[in-house]
Amino acid sequence: MTKRIAVIGGGIVGLATAYKLQEKMPDAKVVLFEKENKIGMHQSGRNSGVLHCGLYYQPGSLKAKLAVSGIQQMTDFCIQNNISHDICGKIVVASNEREINFLDDLADRGTKNGLAGLKFLTKEELTKREPFVSAKKALLVPQEGIVDYKEVMNTLASIIKMRGGEIILSTKITSVTNKGNTVIISDNKNEWEFDLIYNCAGLYSDRNYKKFTHKKRPLRIVPFRGEYLMLKPEAKKLVNHLIYPVPDPEYPFLGVHFTRLINGEREVGPNAVFAFKREGYSNMDFSIKDTLDSVTYIGFLKFIKNNFMFSMNELKSSLFISEFLKKAKKLIPDIDETMFVKGTAGVRAQAMDENGKLLMDFNIIREKNQIHVLNAPSPGATASLAIAAYIIENY
Ligand SMILES: Cc1cc2nc3c(=O)[nH]c(=O)nc-3n(C[C@H](O)[C@H](O)[C@H](O)COP(=O)(O)OP(=O)(O)OC[C@H]3O[C@@H](n4cnc5c(N)ncnc54)[C@H](O)[C@@H]3O)c2cc1C
């Protein structure tokens, strides 16, 4: 009998899952549901557009494994489908003694994760590559690159439809009920019956889990907004490729960085500000439901208590451009406010546990015929094809 499979969520993880399901089971009927009227409207269409190769992640973690295989799969997919991308490499810049130690650790981690060609740059090599960067020490990561994830998602969607799959837009799945060996899903107007469903709902993955399984959420998604500024055309020469700071190992955020986009624009960001709305892209956006969901969570209260200065600094960087640029000036001291215009913003779906710990690794759970992708933060876009293959194989 033909297997009927639903994917809930038309971000890059949902699309990659539908695509890989068709590869693995060519006879299956795959239907993807997206609540917006277009695919990729949230995290996947609002990120830095970077192909991460596995530098940062704990050796042996799922993230490390899937980032390394994910960048390869994503690059191959781009080559096969003529999607513009550029493996331009990036530098990670240490600005003080403490960061030099972390940078050495990062190089170590990268090597353990199998990255070849990592190289500390001499002053001359750095100046040749990025003449405006100031660094105490700089690591070149040659495998990293840039891509337009919207183009990747549009291509995935076209292939899914070409192979006989369906993408149903403007359809928010509101209930899921297990019925024998099948699952009934509904948007309040229509009902569909499937053998298996994948919840790839990004910022709503935890709430969907609770609604669909009637179980307590094992973690909570706490939204962290990331804001960007764009360099004006006359200041673009300050950035050639990708310029990253050494991230604080306590946090999953990579820190404000400079990115060359695939269309030639240059942006700087993102910060990591607690968002009062899960899909709220401005600092004026507010949702009572989303805010209460975070602030009544014991984990969130513990997080704020233990990370008060971090949270305040990020908030300041959202309210004052000078505070935002302080972070970027560490990398390129010559910048000033006149060189930038406001850019876009994205909101990260960051999972947190009851102890207030930000969960670094990808997290997937199966409950009967429902598979829930509960945490797929950065580098979830790079690793999406590898995440998809992994969950299909293992859950
Ligand atoms: C600011 C920022 C910068 C980042 N930079 C990078 C980067 O440079 N490189 C990288 O690899 N990763 C990056 N990431 C991470 C990456 O974007 C995410 O890991 C990835 O996009 C997650 O994809 P997703 O499909 O899980 O989520 P999403 O893209 O958020 O998709 C989830 C989809 O589910 C839909 N949905 C939710 N509930 C329902 C429902 N009930 N019914 C139907 N549809 C529903 C939503 O509308 C949404 O379209 C960044 C993220 C952010 C926010």
Image: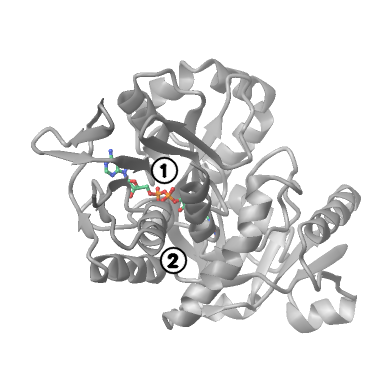
| Quadrant in the rendering for residue 359 | top right
| Residue under numbered circle 2 | 149
| Residue under numbered circle 1 | 202
Q: Is residue 194 above or below residue 342?
A: above
**Image position, residue 191 (x, y; %):** 13, 37
Number of numbered labels in the structure image: 2
Q: Residue at x 76, y 66 (%)?
A: 115
Q: Is residue 83 above or below residue 355?
A: below
Is residue 89 in sight in this rendering? yes
In the picture provided, is 124 more to the left or to the right than 66? right
Query: For the residue with label 2, is its CB less than 8 Å from the closest atom of ligand 1?
Result: yes
Q: Residue at x 19, y 39 (%)?
A: 193
| Quadrant in the rendering for residue 153 | bottom left
Please report whichever mark, 2 or 1, sits nearer to the chain's N-terminal start: 2
In the picture provided, is 355 more to the left or to the right than 121? left
Q: Amino acid at mark 1?
A: Gly
Q: Secondary structure at mark 2?
A: helix
Q: Amino acid at mark 2?
A: Tyr
**Image position, residue 170 (x, y; %):** 18, 49
Query: For the residue with label 1, is its CB less than 8 Å from the closest atom of ligand 1?
Result: yes
